[in-house]
């Protein structure tokens, strides 16, 4: 069993689960924090949380080159189909499906989801991944703190990936409340420091997380990774 979570900066991650590469919100081009080119990214699956440009990012180019299956909400999958992608799987809020890597459920996010050309992108979401090797990962997407996160405590989340940048999503104080609701073993923050609007003291968040919750908190710089034992 091996699960490696690689941070690509801003909101982009690759989860490598026993060799299967699940790329989440592949924003490389114009991502100030990214150090890799979208042309070098390998993917078996691509998960898109919502339509905003800093999340749908390079999905079309990477999916066309790699043939990865793209999983997103119904409206975004329709938009990607119009862009020429064929290997697509639509989900919607509260619904999950069994994929070759495990189960993926689309979770609630309180945010917007218009696509870069102004097309309606449905409701924004997050992802709850129950990997075949037994590990559970929650990616919150861009979201406010929501009390619905309390239900995730039933899922024994190993790693919660949470936005902390404030302004467009929950900030550090609300993210601490989210950790208390979700009760994950480990927290990895993202969606901070990319632009001045979302400058956040991640080290202060880490300190508060360690002091005030039972979770470990890991800060990743671009292309750093976290291995789940
Ligand atoms: Ni957004
Ligand atoms: Mn965003």
Image (tube, grey):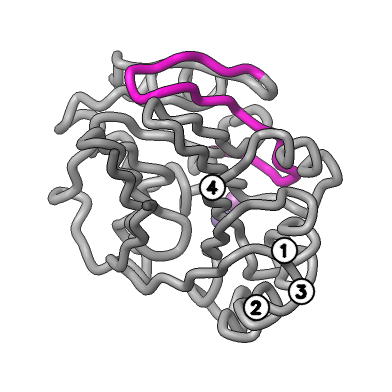
Q: Which mark is residue 212?
A: 3
Residue 103 on image: x %, y %: 48, 22
Q: Classify 10 Å Cα crowding around label 4: few (below 14), some (14-19), many (20 and above).
A: some
Distance, label 4 to label 2, CA atoms, is 19 Å
Whether tag 2 and tag 1 are in contact, CB under 8 A, the answer is yes
| Marks 2 and 3 close (CB-CB < 8 Å) | no
Secondary structure at badge 2 equals helix
Task: Please tell me the numbered disc located at residue 175.
Answer: 1
Residue designated by label 4: 158
Q: Residues within 10 Å of mark 2 (few under 14, many from 20)?
A: many
Residue 186 highlighted magenta (yes or no): no
* Mark 1 Cα shell of 10 Å, populated few (<14), some (14-19), many (≥20): many
Mark positioned earlier in the residue sequence (4 or 1): 4
**x and y percent of residue 95 in the render?**
63, 17
> What numbered label is drawn on residue 205?
2
Looking at the rendering, the stretch of residues picked out in magenta corresponds to: 95-115
Tell which circle, 4 or 3, labels the residue nearer the N-terminal end: 4
């Amino acid at each position: 069993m091996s699960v490696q979570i690689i941070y690509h900066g801003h909101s982009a991650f690759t989860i490598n689960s026993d060799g299967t590469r699940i790329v989440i919100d592949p924003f490389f081009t114009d991502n100030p924090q990214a150090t890799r080119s979208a042309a070098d990214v390998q993917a078996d699956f691509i998960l898109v949380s919502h339509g905003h440009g800093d999340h749908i990012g390079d999905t079309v180019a990477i999916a066309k080159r790699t043939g990865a299956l793209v999983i997103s909400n119904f409206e975004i999958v329709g938009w990607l189909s119009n862009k020429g992608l064929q290997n697509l799987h639509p989900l919607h809020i509260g619904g999950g499906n069994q994929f070759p890597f495990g189960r993926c459920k689309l979770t609630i996010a309180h945010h917007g989801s218009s696509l870069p050309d102004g097309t309606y992108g449905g409701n924004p979401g997050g992802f709850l991944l129950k990997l075949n090797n037994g590990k559970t990962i929650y990616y919150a997407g861009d979201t406010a703190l929501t009390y619905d996160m309390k239900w995730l405590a039933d899922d024994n989340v190993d790693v919660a990936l949470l936005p902390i940048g404030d302004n467009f999503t929950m900030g550090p104080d609300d993210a601490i409340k989210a950790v208390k609701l979700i009760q994950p073993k480990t927290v990895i923050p993202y969606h901070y420091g990319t632009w001045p609007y979302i400058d956040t003291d991640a080290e202060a968040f880490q300190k508060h997380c360690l002091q005030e919750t039972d979770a470990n908190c890991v800060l990743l710089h671009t292309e750093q990774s976290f291995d789940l034992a």
